[in-house]
Image: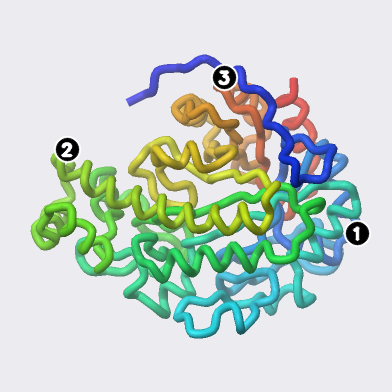
Amino acid sequence: MTPSPTPTPNLPPTPTPAEVQPPYAPPTVSGHAYPWDVVGDPGFADRVREAGLDSVTLAVSYHSTRAATPLHPRHRFVDARHSALYRPVRAGAWAGRRLAPSGAAWVEGRDPAAAAALALADAGIPVSAWLVLAHNSLLGTRHPDLAVTNCFGEPYPYALCPAQEEVREYCATLAAEALRDLPPDAVRGVSLESAGQLGAVHAGCHEKTDGAYTAAELRALSVCCCAACRAAWQAAGLDPDRVTGRLRGGQDLPAELGEVLLRVRHEAADALRGRVLDIVRTTLPGAEVTLHAHPDPWATGPSPGLTERAATDADALLVPCWPTGPESAELVQAVASGLPVNAYVTALPPADPAALPAHVRRLRAAGATRLSLYHLGLLPRERLPLLAALAKEFRA
């Protein structure tokens, strides 16, 4: 159902926290990047300035990827073979835990995220630390009992389940270690991705599942049935075996059952996010926290469904707006939480450069107060001028 349009919110500017070194205003237009895009490239900061960006959102913990680097002077690909923390992985911080991050041998230096953040700060470019939390194929493969598990008993190894206490503790410690000793005058914000449950869809590993299941089937296959979630259902008065049997049918769920399942998922996401936010607020008390979120409460993935509590926890919301049709503007309108809304837009192929300026204008008209562009390291050289054009369109 298409949400009813809401007027563009007349939001006051976010006040500068006392702990942040003034002068600082939240970014209007930012761009995403990986540490390897910055480290070893003396021209990176110049490209950020030429694009007219206010800040860079820099990956500090990230999932596996094989990334093109068409603009880097020393390499053309980076094979990030597994999820990694791009800060030192200190044995003492993870002693006695099953879940612990791995380092990144494919990037030079012991502390590549800090090196990249400081290089940008030295160039006068503020940084937001981009933390990927519950999306970790390496750990999910090693510990399938902690992964999201569907109604057929199949674990999704890329998805750690927020209902598991070990997962919440891992994400909180990951945030603490990611932000440890980063200077607040360099890192002004924190961007939280996958701060909730991932589901059946995983855009990776040569995905061959498109079109195989209906929307109702994908929703059912995205309901986690791990031991912790089943225990929560039982505590809510449900019979876990009957629930999984119903889910296997792949049909739309009865309203009352759907309400309980969604409440269990959202309570787990709230608990995970709350633990992480406690760490973030303590470690970088002046940092603005942006939450990757989706207005559909059933959404799973990097931008999980927005819970009622999420809108009071975060300082801003980032909404995925990669499709250039009207559906992205409808997502922005549907958030309507009173928080600043950051429209997340890709400038990469196959996005049509001719369609992007109008797309950005629609998002601004729909209520987006910020624009986040993807991606500063992956972008081909011929598309570089597009970033400046989109920044100008959004500010206009």
For badge 2, the amino acid type reads Ala
Res 9 label: 3
* Closest to the observer, 86 or 221: 86
- Estimate the x, y position of residue 378 in percent, counting from the top left: 70, 54
For badge 3, the amino acid type reads Pro
Q: How is the image coloured?
A: rainbow
Taking the image as shown, residue 149 lies to the left or right of residue 181, namely left
Q: Disc 1 to disc 3, how far (Cα)?
A: 40 Å
Dividing the picture into quarters, in which one does residue 84 lie? bottom right
Foreground disc of the pair 2, 1: 2
Q: Which residue is mark 1?
A: 42
Marks 2 and 1, the one that precedes in the sequence: 1
Rendered-image quadrant of the N terminus: top left
Q: Is residue 78 visible?
A: yes
Height in image: 390 above or below 167?
A: above
Taking the image as shown, residue 361 lies to the left or right of residue 162, namely right
Secondary-structure class at tag 3: loop
